[in-house]
Amino acid sequence: SRSSVWRGSSVASTTSTSTSLNSVPSLIVFDLDNTLWTPELYQLRKLARNNQLPVAHKDVKLFPAAKEMIMEMKKDEKYANTKFAVASRTQSVDWAHDLLNQFELKEWLDYVEIFPGDKKKHFNNLKRSSGIDFEEMLFFDDARDGKYGNCEPVSAMGVLSVHCPNGIYEEKIWVNAMSQYKEWYAHKTPGTIVEWDGSVTTMKPTDPNERFRGNVQFINREKRFGFIQYGGRGTKDMFFHFNDLPYGDDINEGDELSFTVVTARNGKDAAANIEISKSDTDASDLVNMHVFSMNLPFVALLSNGYKTLETRNGTMFVPYKAGTKMLLHAGQRIYPDGDRHIDVMKSGGLDDDEIKALKSLPPGFGKGMAVAIVELGETFETTLEERCDPDFQRKVAAFGADAGMRATVIRRVEYLKRPVKVSGRGGVFKANIDKSVIPDGWLDDDADSDGGSSDKKTGKVYYSATF
């Protein structure tokens, strides 16, 4: 069995030349929550309240493909000289260690980094403990970018990172990762990420003189800092401090800024040389709205009124009360569901021509644009049995096993008067939009419901809160 080296140990291992020559990673690192196992440990609140430990294979389960991958790597001679590690930022440190024992993974791991904080610290510790350079490592994680993203910052260190937002749920995820590592090892370009669909993206190195444009996403006036939302899906919100704002200028959420990027004293990126853009459009002609992004064909199915439920495993819509209006953004990709949505739609009696029309956006509307405005209804949790109901599946345009556990009702939807170019982001983000593109009546004040509620007839718990 393998001997584990814990964080802070001075023990180092010698990197094998054979792994390098064969372009097999010398160290493979896995995140835990929603990567090797599910659910995320913070979700087990009832166990925490009762001071109980989660039970492996009952409360927490390994993704089937993750288990298969571990078994294969244990017996495959190709990985004989490869080391294995986990790196997790979970707050449930004791639980994570105990589950590794229950799953009998501890003896398989050479290094274990489990503590809250910055993933970069995990990898600096791994490099110091193992003696293995970052370009000899391969990393799997479900969180790509943004505030809680891991793939982007770790890839910037020179580690090839694999984004698996739904965990290692099928064999092709890690098989493709190994293949991509072999190709990547020839050039070892920092900032490279193997995306969830198998494609590869590389972040462009930052030019210190390059200016970026973005919108203020968040401001903390008391502590005098904020974040700027800019770029596309490969960027995260940029920190700025009020000391770097033009003297005497006021700033508000939604304001457009231009800036350069510098490395702050804490080693993280920050905006500098900030200029507040002066818009040709009067501020009174703009509306600052929440936006969320979906990929084709589902963005069209929702915009055309077929899809009336949006399901997620995450809590993206939980903070927003019923009645909240958001813009719908068309992402840059096609969601790879193997055309299973077509089978669901045909089960309701639709023919090929009707399905084609529902999957299409109007002329002039396309990827990278805000295309419609929606009004959200309640968000509620569902069981697998409920998600497998044929009517539910048609409302989601997905089979029950493919749908997320939290469903959000789409009360109504309408296309914008014209599409608007918007840089897409993960989760819910904000953008300033010309009021003239919003369909008539949507910006009128109406009596939104407030507070959470429960349906006594169904017993479902509805989430509703002010963001």
Image (cartoon, rainbow, N blue to C red):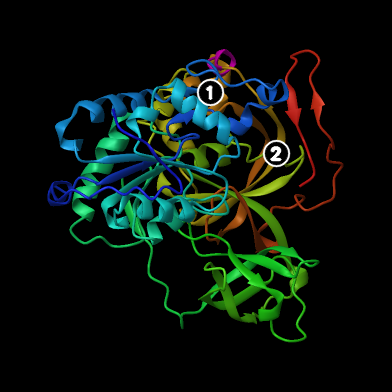
| Res 194 visible | no
The disc labelled 2 sits on which kind of residue? Leu
Q: Residue 169's x, y, as percent? A: 39, 29
Query: CA–CA distance between discs 1 and 2?
Result: 18 Å
- The residue lying at 20 percent from left, 40 percent from top is 81
Residue 436's image quarter?
Answer: bottom right
Q: Which residues are magenta?
A: 384-388
Q: Is residue 349 left or right of residue 130?
A: right
Q: Hey, what amino acid is under mark 1? A: Arg
For marks 1 and 2, give the one nearer the viewer: 2
Q: Secondary structure at mark 1?
A: helix
In this image, 398 relative to 221: left or right? left
Where does the image place residue 284, in percent across and percent down from the top left? Answer: 78, 70
Kindly indicate the quadrant of the structure image that contains residue 174: top left
* Label disc, if present, on residue 376 of the rendered structure: 2
Residue 107 visible? The answer is yes
- Image position, residue 114 (x, y; %): 50, 41
What residue sits right under mark 1 in the picture?
A: 394
- The residue sitting at 81% across, 66% down in the picture is 222
Q: Position of residue 376 (x, y in %)?
A: 70, 38
